[in-house]
Image: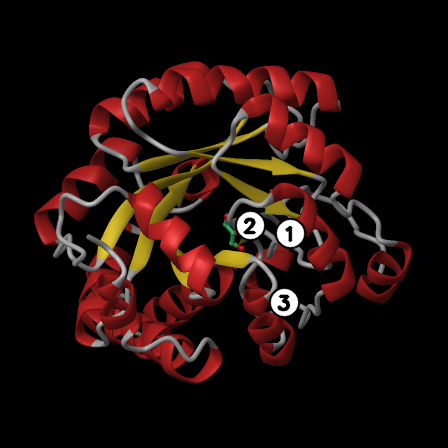
Amino acid sequence: MITGKVSIDQIMRKAYRHRILIPAFNVAYLPMIKPIVDTLKKTYTFGLVEVARPDVEKFGAKSFREVANRYYALADRQFSRLHLDHIPVIDEDGKNVHWEYLIRMGLELGYDSVMIDGSRLNLKENIAITKRVVDISHQQGVPVEAELGAVLGHEEGPLPSYEELFQTKKGFTSPEQAERFVKETGVDWLSVAIGNIHGAISGIAKNKRKVSARLNLDHLRELTRVTKIPLVLHGGSGVKKASLIEAVQNGITKINVGTSIRQIYEQSLSKKPDDVETAQMRVAEEIERLIKEEYEIAGSWNHLTKWIK
Ligand code: 13P
């Protein structure tokens, strides 16, 4: 049974083995935590509450400490864990980030899993830094997610057209590199690029609707064959349902969802500026729709809990 004591590593491994999708919802504003945790519980779905550095720096998540405090005050731990998303080594604006400080802070604050994003480094440097984070985090029993390849979209400036990106496999994770990366780092989960892109986080593009991405399933199968660990799909907003359902059957275990719920929250507040409650309700409705209609995972807690001793 999943109680508050079961490690997220164990839950993710079971989900990977049984091909169950774990949704991870980004907290772009602190009041979004409540609709996320409430909807997971209401629908008996196991999921993650996550916050990334851009949520804190560019939106209204305030700080990793405030997110953790509010999460622990609100969450029923049977249905969720807290994940530290995207701690980049070099950020989307090209700045160096004090990643080790932030990872250690996340561990101290009680984040159940962490992500180091060395995807803007060369392979050797990405391996070295990811391995260092694995060493630090595993000492405390905390699993680590890393990224290999380029899930584009967070950087400012124009991208090639989505079709061009998909056809040329620009930024796609290389299976040869992925095999080596997993072996040499001991990382627990790997974020891969297979046609997925992040929603924009700056300029006017951040308010626009995202393209509807599809996924290269042959490429994914190859990555799954060589890595044998849970794979993560960043840029989850707007991925075509048919692609996603197939992807889960082929090794994607976690999906990160940021842009779509952030935009719903912001749009509601721009219509009714002081009405946080309505904005929270809109976020809850969208999360419920995603869980039930797009991912078809309502009740996943009931399945996962059977496989966990
Ligand atoms: P979207 O904002 O495109 O949903 O991606 C979220 C994400 O991958 C956060 O890590």
Q: Where's residue 194, x and y in %?
A: 72, 55
Q: Dot 3 lies on which element?
A: loop
Q: Dot 1 lies on which element?
A: helix
Q: Earlier in the sequence, mark 1 or mark 2?
A: 1
Nearer to us: label 1 or label 2 = 1
**Residue on which the image places disc 2:** 231
Q: Where's residue 24, x and y in %?
A: 39, 56
Q: Earlier in the sequence, mark 1 or mark 3?
A: 3
Please identify the quadrant where the N terminus is shown. Answer: bottom left
Mark 1 neighbour class, 10 Å CA radius: few under 14, some 14 to 19, many 20 or more: some
Q: Dot 2 lies on which element?
A: strand
Q: Residue at x 67, y 58 (%)?
A: 196
**Residue on which the image places disc 3:** 210
**Residue on which the image places disc 1:** 224
Circle 3: residue type: Lys
In the figure, is residue 223 to the left or right of 167?
A: left
Circle 2: residue type: Leu
Q: Residue at x 63, y 21 (%)?
A: 127
Q: Earlier in the sequence, mark 2 or mark 3?
A: 3
Mark 2 neighbour class, 10 Å CA radius: few under 14, some 14 to 19, many 20 or more: many
